[in-house]
């Protein structure tokens, strides 16, 4: 069984890796065109998502990340359905739309709880900061939700170091830790190391939850300048010809290191993140094969020299 650790300074015990379920669920109507669906070309349907869910649990990866916004709530609904009666930890995010104000938090929470079919959410995260949302006011409402037993741990997402400090201070006044900040972080997106977020996480005892830890698939080694990814992500700068050519030496190094341990490039890329105690990656998995592969990042270690070699090889992605 994989060891668990505290998420930030909260009492929530989590594994060192989670699963992102952004692409899961049966979207209806306009939600079928949600970025989570069209950017990746969709996941593989209920039966395969169930197998991915079960494979993750068996491997000890019992933390699943969703959001009210993903496919108009379809991802939350699917995760709730799969997690019923299971020992799974659910991380979700609010709001479900863009016109959110702090006062709407209690209603947002009830809607997510209903979709998930649960009385509480293990980690409830503010999805992205906004000028319309006063952070201390929002944190107070989240503290109320913790005291009411509807939320176990509070997190934020896409917050800058300064915004994190404001949220952390507001919650501290209520005696509640800010457990996590979920931001984009991978070998090909190293800004958290230079924009102060990783340092602030370390200083304040907040876990950095790394989203898109496989750089949306670019680090898996299966794409190149000629072998294009599915969905609209192929139009993003990270997938253009020049970017994909620049990634190939990184994939080559991931492969070379992986061969020493019988591990895939994805597993080595995830392990580079896990070797940092402050970081918890949540790779997306469309099927059980990917879920099983990603969970394999928990069953080996990189040497400090290997971590360093990967850091050196991806220096250009720090800016
Ligand atoms: N807070 C936020 O604003 C935010 C934003 C984005 C994502 N997220 C969260 O982060 C999670 C993960 O991020 P992400 O899905 O954007 O990027 P990712 O984890 O870097 O990439 C996921 C994609 O890579 C491919 N893949 C995954 N595992 C693989 C494996 N072992 N072997 C080969 N291919 C593999 C799959 O697509 P293909 O098979 O089609 O290549 C999968 O959809 C999301 O599910 C969501 O929960 C949060």
Image (spheres, rainbow, N blue to C red):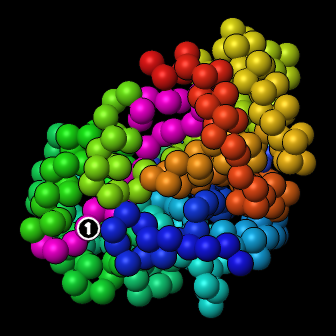
- Residue hosting label 1: 177
Q: What residue lies at 63% left-to-right and 40% top-to-bottom?
A: 304
Residue range in magenta is 174-193
Q: Position of residue 196 (x, y in %)?
A: 31, 34
What residue is rendered at 64% in x and 86% in y? 86
Image quadrant where one finds the C terminus: top left
Q: Is residue 307 left or right of residue 69?
A: right
Q: Nearer the viewer, residue 186 or 306?
A: 306
Q: Secondary structure at mark 1?
A: loop
Q: Note whether 75 is above or below 97 in the view shown.
A: below
Residue 95 image position (x, y, % from top left) = 34, 57
Is there any visible trace of residue 216 in the rendered image? no
As for residue 3 lying within the magenta part, the answer is no
Asked if residue 197 shows in the view, the reply is yes
Numbered-mark total: 1
Residue drawn at x 55%, y 19% is 315
Of residue 74 and residue 219, the one placed in the foreground of this image is 219
Above or below for 189 versus 86? above
């Amino acid at each position: 069984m994989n060891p668990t650790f505290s998420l930030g300074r909260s009492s929530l015990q989590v594994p060192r890796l989670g699963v992102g379920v952004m692409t899961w669920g049966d979207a209806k109507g306009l939600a079928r065109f949600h970025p989570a669906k069209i950017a990746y070309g969709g996941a593989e349907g209920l039966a395969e998502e169930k197998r991915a869910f079960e494979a993750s649990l068996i491997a000890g990866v019992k933390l699943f990340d969703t959001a009210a916004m993903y496919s108009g709530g379809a991802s939350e609904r699917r995760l709730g359905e799969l997690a019923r009666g299971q020992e799974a930890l659910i991380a979700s995010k609010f709001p479900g739309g863009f016109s959110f104000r702090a006062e709407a938090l209690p209603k947002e929470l009830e809607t997510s709880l209903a979709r998930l079919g649960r009385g509480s959410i293990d980690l409830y995260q503010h999805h992205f900061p906004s000028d319309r949302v006063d952070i201390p006011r929002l944190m107070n409402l989240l503290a109320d939700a913790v005291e009411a037993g509807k939320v176990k741990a509070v997190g934020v997402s896409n917050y800058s170091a300064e915004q994190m400090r404001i949220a952390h201070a507001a919650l501290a006044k209520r005696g509640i830790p800010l457990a996590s900040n979920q931001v984009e972080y991978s070998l090909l997106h190293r800004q958290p190391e230079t924009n102060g977020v990783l340092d602030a996480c370390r200083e304040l005892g907040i876990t950095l939850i790394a989203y898109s830890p496989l750089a949306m698939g670019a680090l898996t080694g299966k794409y190149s300048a000629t072998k294009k990814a599915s969905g609209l992500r192929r139009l993003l700068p990270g997938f253009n010809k020049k970017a994909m050519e620049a990634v190939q030496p990184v994939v080559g190094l991931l492969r070379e290191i992986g061969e020493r341990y019988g591990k895939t490039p994805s597993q080595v890329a995830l392990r580079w993140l896990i070797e940092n105690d402050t970081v918890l990656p949540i790779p997306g998995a469309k099927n059980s094969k990917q879920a099983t592969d990603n969970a394999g990042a928990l069953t080996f270690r990189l040497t400090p020299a290997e971590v360093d070699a990967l850091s050196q090889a991806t220096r250009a992605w720090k800016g």
